[in-house]
Amino acid sequence: MIVTFLFFLFLLLENLLLPALVGPRSFLIVPLFVFAIVVYGNNTKLRLIQAIVFLIITEMFSASGFGDMILPFLIVIALYWWTNSFLDIKLTLRESGVLASFLGGAFFLSLLAFLFSYAFLFLQLSYSFLEAWQMVIILIKTSVYQIGGWALAFVIIFKYVVFQKK
Amino acid sequence: MKSLKLWSLFFIFLIVALLVFFIFLGSFRLGDYSASIKNIRVSFFSKINVFSSFLSKIERISKLTKENMFLKNENTKLLSLLASQDELQDQINFLRESLDLDIFSGHKFIDARIFNFQFTPEGHHFLINKGGESGIKIGDIIVVSTGILLGVVDNVDEGFSRASLITNSGSKITVKVLGKNTTGIARGFLNEGLRLDFISQNDQIVEGDTIITNGNDMFPPGLLIGKVSNIIFADDGDLFKKVILEPEFKKINLDRVLILTQ
């Protein structure tokens, strides 16, 4: 329930409130949010379904084409799952100490967001690896701090508040 | 006999005096009595009056409530009229402002409003409240009434359209420096604004220069893009200067736009 409430809050924040208050800025709040619930949520499969539902709502809200966000998300999640099978990233992030958890979690969520961006651009730009790469580089150059900041905020929200271990 | 007469006179005087006394006394008592009755009546009537004024107050309150409701309705109607008049005035001013601009001559333009912003890895897209039914097509140019270029329509639906900002990483516009012969290509650079490509080390350009479209591509000439905010001179033998532009649309409130149909 709280996750759904937070999702709508951040959806409105990214698409209505922040553009109205600070003008157009790059944040990737919704993608970071859905990755955070999958990485920090207890029941990964359930959280994955929830994340897909959230992305469908986002696509409808922002008049994007169906699958524009879901497809790159699924590609990145598949990559994450495969990597997790031998690196155990999820467990490491959940069990690590405060500083490592903050920095590691923020770095990992930012990495997932940039991979998502690359997959998104690759699919949007008629499968052009090079053009997508150039655009991701622009995104990293211009908004790495904003995206890193939001990733850190989501680590704190999800690890220490919403999915806190009892 | 004489004493009898005196006594009789005294007696008559006494009777007259007593009569006078009693008459005065009587008249005083009558007056007092009538004053008392008057007081009682006043008090009684005042009590009745309080009651009647209370009743009349209730009646007046009821009338006032009705009047108040009527006035509130009237006020709402007037406010609604005022709002529609204000909106019309706003629209008239906006269109008047637009018509004065030479750059829009020969173009059909549609007035629309922005109602949503969305950020994707490509950059910002915004939704406008006019779509295919208003004659909008993909590739139509979006400007604000003062001639500032905002973006291009990239998706059209019934009732709304989606457009991308000129600062998006895929955006490219051929531009020139206002009042100079320097030309180049402005490329969207997300949060940083725009970057001006192909400006050689010898080209005349300084910070604060105004950049406009030169009309060599799909955009009509003379649309305002932004101002040069930073120039980085390369030391390593680079042929071109690195020029950063601050888009002009960041300085205005993005609400009402014009769509120049092709």
Image (cartoon, coloured by chain):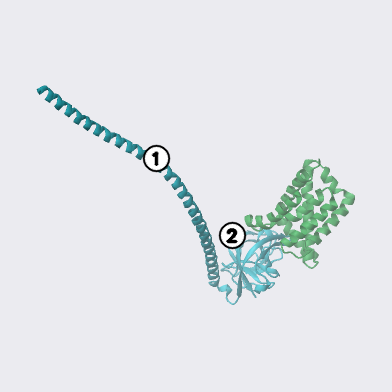
Chain colours: A green, B cyan
Q: Residue B256's spot in the image, x, y percent?
A: 60, 65
> Spatial distance from mark 1 to mark 2, Cα to Cα?
76 Å
Residue that appears at 48% across and 54% down: B63
Q: Residues within 10 Å of mark 2 (few under 14, many from 20)?
A: few
Query: Left or right: where does residue A31 sit relative to residue A45?
Result: left
Q: What secondary structure is marked by label 1?
A: helix
Q: Residue A139's spot in the image, x, y percent?
A: 73, 58
Asked whether B78 or A92 is in front, the reply is: B78
Question: Are circles 1 and 2 on residues that touch, CB within 8 Å?
Answer: no
Counting labels gives 2
Q: Which residue position holds label 2?
A: B251
Q: Residue A33's spot in the image, x, y percent?
A: 76, 53
Q: What secondary structure is marked by label 2?
A: helix
Residue that appears at 24% across and 34% down: B23
Q: Kindly identify which numbered label has been placed on residue B165.
A: none
Q: Which residue position holds label 1?
A: B43
Q: Residue B205's spot in the image, x, y percent?
A: 60, 64
Q: Amino acid at mark 1?
A: Ser
Vertical arrangement, residue A99 with respect to residue B155, above or below? above
Chain for disc number 1: B
Asked whether A40 or B208 is in front, the reply is: A40
Chain for disc number 2: B
**Between disc 1 and disc 2, whose residue precedes?**
1
Say if residue A80 shows up in the picture. yes
Q: Amino acid at mark 2?
A: Lys
Residue that appears at 84% across and 49% down: A43
| Picture quadrant of residue A18 | bottom right
